[in-house]
Image: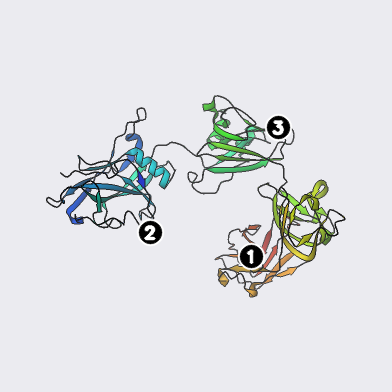
Amino acid sequence: MTALLSMGFVACTENFDPAVGPQTNIPESQLQTSDITVSSTAPNEIKLTDYIDAETSIETPIPIGVATVKEGAMPANTILKAEVEVSRDADFAESVIIDANSMEVSDEITIQPSVLQDAYFSEITKNPNTTSLYIRVIMYTLTNGEALASIGNPNENFYAAKTVSFTPLNKITIAPAYYIIGGPNDWEQSAANRSIKFKHSGEDVYVDPIFTVVFDAKADGDTWFAIGDDEACDAIGNGDWSKLYGIVGGESESTEGKIERREILKAENSFCVKNAKKIRVTINMMENTFKVEKLNFTEFIYVPGNAQGWSPATAAALHSPNFDGVYTGYAVLDGGFKFTKERNWDGGEYNWSNFTTVSSALNNGAGTDTNIYCDDAGLYFLKVDVGNGTIEATKITNMNLVGDFNGWNEKDDNQKMTWDANNLCFSITGAGVTANGWKFTANNGWGINLGGDPADLVGDGGNLSVVGTTIKLYPCRTTSDKIFCTVE
């Protein structure tokens, strides 16, 4: 029996570039790969609850394999070291390497369950659900206690490869969806309808645990609400309100802090927001934290001016999807214009006096009024930050189709669209777009582009796949609050 020793002997993990692999800068051992065998002893199922005592936290090492060296093959003053590579994918493209426990007095290769747990959550995924793990062993020799050498090539020679079912300790559970309960709506009805749902990126919730929602404040009075998942909503249907999340500490008007279920808080601890038009709530369910923001900016502003008769009712709309006072969109400018907060003059306006930094394409005329002026008439892409007092204005000289069909050539004059000033649209007939993907680009570049849903186009949106030969683009949001296109 040969004694085996873990080099650092301290439980740790090491990360390697998958293209490079582990420890390629160390010399190769005199011990040949044919001189050693490692028999797998890993169980088919590894449940960390079986290896870590919940009450005492005492750990039982997880068996991985048993190493045997051919008699007489081990060099003098030399012992073995083992590492265990763990991956959620069979190709080990993204993996983590863990030092095995000391094998100085044993030929068994084992790892500490807490080390595996930490490596799994920090380097592989934070998802606590049962999954398949691929494991394999890398072997080294250690001579005179310090000279480390690999047995074979550590990028190619592996031992005791096995696939196991792995269940980590369930430290935290994140639901796939969360909702605002209460707010501007009846509490019980909002739980039943689940109409105010948090948005999420669509990634694994344990990789991206952040959820965000923007909703209307209550029309009259303070806005009280709580946060719930589907479990909480179902419980409310049965008369149980304890599954909702409230504020740790109970300060209802807190704008940041921790959240926890009412059944743990032993109190309601609901949220309260005063004097807001809209409210944005952001939660991080990995850390159980929240942030509440009052949003008193409107979702849209409008661009009435000389170009369209100074009528807010028919003016182009600029959109602020985050309600943060940063608005973007397209408008025809010719001479003076302003921005209104509603489709009328009664709701207030933003004019030259509200801005400190403006595009060189704009000016204040003779300075005798508060209008903003554009001397070079045409269609413009506007970015207006009313909070910081800035306006960026880019004249749109052309709009092209670009896609798989033309090699994504944004300078393709054959796909240039024609501007219809009367109907405020770009059009092209005989377009060659295909289902393989296409978009709209402006000014022969990618700085300003549109994609996504044909009925709701957005800047830098995804590729469109709808097919047709006659395409019309309506960028100005005059008859709709959305930028859209038609494809026939």
Identify the element where label 2 is drawn: loop
Q: Nearer the viewer, residue 42 or 380?
A: 380
Q: Quadrant of the N terminus?
A: top left
Identify the element where label 3 is drawn: loop
Eyeballing the image, is 369 above or below 418? Answer: above
- Between the residue at mark 2 and the residue at mark 3, the CA separation in whole angstroms equals 57 Å
Give the percent coordinates (x, y) of residue 342: 78, 48
The structure residue drawn at horizontal position 29% and vertical position 47%, both measured from the top left corner, is 83
* Residue type for callout 3: Asp
Q: Quadrant of the C terminus?
A: bottom right
Give the percent coordinates (x, y) of residue 307: 82, 61
- The 10 Å Cα crowd at callout 2, few under 14, some 14 to 19, many 20 or more, is few
The residue to which callout 2 is attached is: 19
Residue 303 is drawn in which quadrant?
Answer: bottom right
* Residue type for callout 1: Phe
The structure residue drawn at horizontal position 30% and vertical position 47%, both measured from the top left corner, is 84
The residue at the far right in this view is 368
Identify the element where label 1 is drawn: strand
Q: Earlier in the sequence, mark 3 or mark 1?
A: 3
Would residue 210 appear left or right of 486 to someone viewing this image? left
Q: Nearer the viewer, residue 193 or 16?
A: 16
The structure residue drawn at horizontal position 19% and vertical position 56%, both measured from the top left corner, is 32
The residue to which callout 1 is attached is: 440
